[in-house]
Image (cartoon, rainbow, N blue to C red):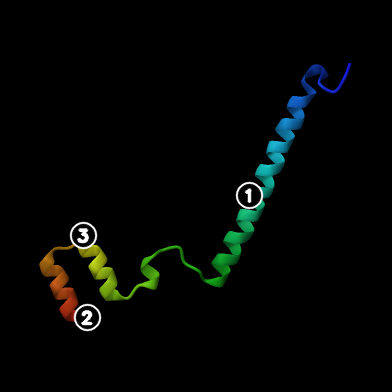
Amino acid sequence: MGFMYGGMWLWWVFGFIIFVLFWGAAIWLIVWAVKKAAGHSTSDASSQNALDIARLRYAKGEITKEQFEQLKKDLS
């Protein structure tokens, strides 16, 4: 009756999708673990100094001009 009899092709497609998802997740997990063990951080703030962080917070509107000036004075 052939390969496509009884919807067998659906099992092949489903199996292939599961195969790709499994190996994709395994590779992602390995990369994540290596980055974590190496101490890499995903945050932008960790690579900036305090004054850059204050400038960024001021630009975002998280602190007022007076607070920014005080932080700048304190950090200088």
* CB-based contact (under 8 Å), mark 2 and mark 3: no
Cα distance between the residues tagged 3 and 1? 37 Å
Q: Secondary structure at mark 1?
A: helix
**Does label 3 or label 1 sit earlier along the sequence?**
1
Q: Amino acid at mark 3?
A: Glu
**Number of callouts in the render?**
3
Q: Amino acid at mark 1?
A: Ala
Q: What residue is disc 3 on?
A: 62
* Picture disc at residue 25: 1
Residue at image position (74%, 35%) is 15
* Residue 5 location (% of width, % of height): 82, 18
Q: Is residue 24 left or right of residue 3?
A: left
Cα distance between the residues tagged 2 and 3? 18 Å
Residue at image position (56%, 71%) is 38
Q: Is residue 28 left or right of residue 46?
A: right
* Residue 61 location (% of width, % of height): 19, 58
Q: How many residues crowd mark 3 within 10 Å: few (<14), some (14–19), many (20+)?
A: few
Q: How many residues crowd mark 1 within 10 Å: few (<14), some (14–19), many (20+)?
A: few
* CB-based contact (under 8 Å), mark 3 and mark 1: no
Q: What residue is disc 2 on?
A: 75
Position of 3 relative to 51 (above/below): above
Q: Amino acid at mark 2?
A: Leu
Q: Secondary structure at mark 2?
A: helix
Query: Toward which corner of the image does residue 75 lie, by quadrant?
Result: bottom left
